[in-house]
Image: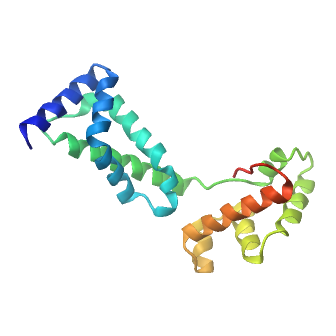
Amino acid sequence: MSETSSTVDQQIIDLLNQRDFVGLELLIKTYKQAIHQEILQHLPSFLHSQLPDLENEVYFKIWEKSQLYDPQKSLLKTWLTAVAKHTTLDFLRQEKNHKKEISLEKWQEDFAIQDPALAQEFFMAHLQSLKSLDQTIFLRYYFYEETAEEIGADLKLSPAKIYNHLSRGRKKLARVLGKEQFHA
């Protein structure tokens, strides 16, 4: 490590520990690419849309925990990429444990339907506008709350393809329902 990078690293840590945003700006300018690459190394491609949020989470954790960095134990870059890696792995564990939910209750809420039986009928009626494969994926994902991995394994499709089908299906349903946007 060069004397200059050591000086910059120390300046970054000193500023962060003083709660000076200039330190965060300098950190991002100096290490953004390394943090970005570390996150991408652990993030599946179908979740790349989460990259900006994960980067922000990493910067927040670094801001909050900068006093924990010990230059005697590792280089700043090593510590930063470890924070990025662990933040990404924590996110993936949460994703795995937290199934996306859009149950009949969500449909009831979204479309202001009071009667649960009517909500189920409404859900099923609008699925008819989708192709057969998309209907199957929608039912299994939203109605039976199976994961994209479980559905993909059965249908011999990758989770990314399942998410693509779900995304296109939501867009089609939004058009059919005359809504500008439909969120899962």
Where residue 95 appears, x then y in whole percent? 53, 54
Residue for point 32% across, 37% down: 28
- Where is the N terminus found, in terms of image quarters? top left
Residue 21 against residue 159 in the figure, above or below: above
How many marks do you count on the picture?
0
* Residue 180 falls left or right of residue 20: right
Residue for point 89% across, 58% down: 122
Where is residue 138, by image quadrant? Answer: bottom right
Where residue 123 appears, x then y in whole percent? 84, 60
* Residue 3 falls left or right of residue 171: left
* Residue 90 falls left or right of residue 101: left
Where is residue 151, by image quadrant? Answer: bottom right
Where residue 130 appears, x then y in whole percent? 79, 70
Here the colouring is rainbow
* Residue 29 falls left or right of residue 135: left
Where residue 132 appears, x then y in whole percent? 77, 77
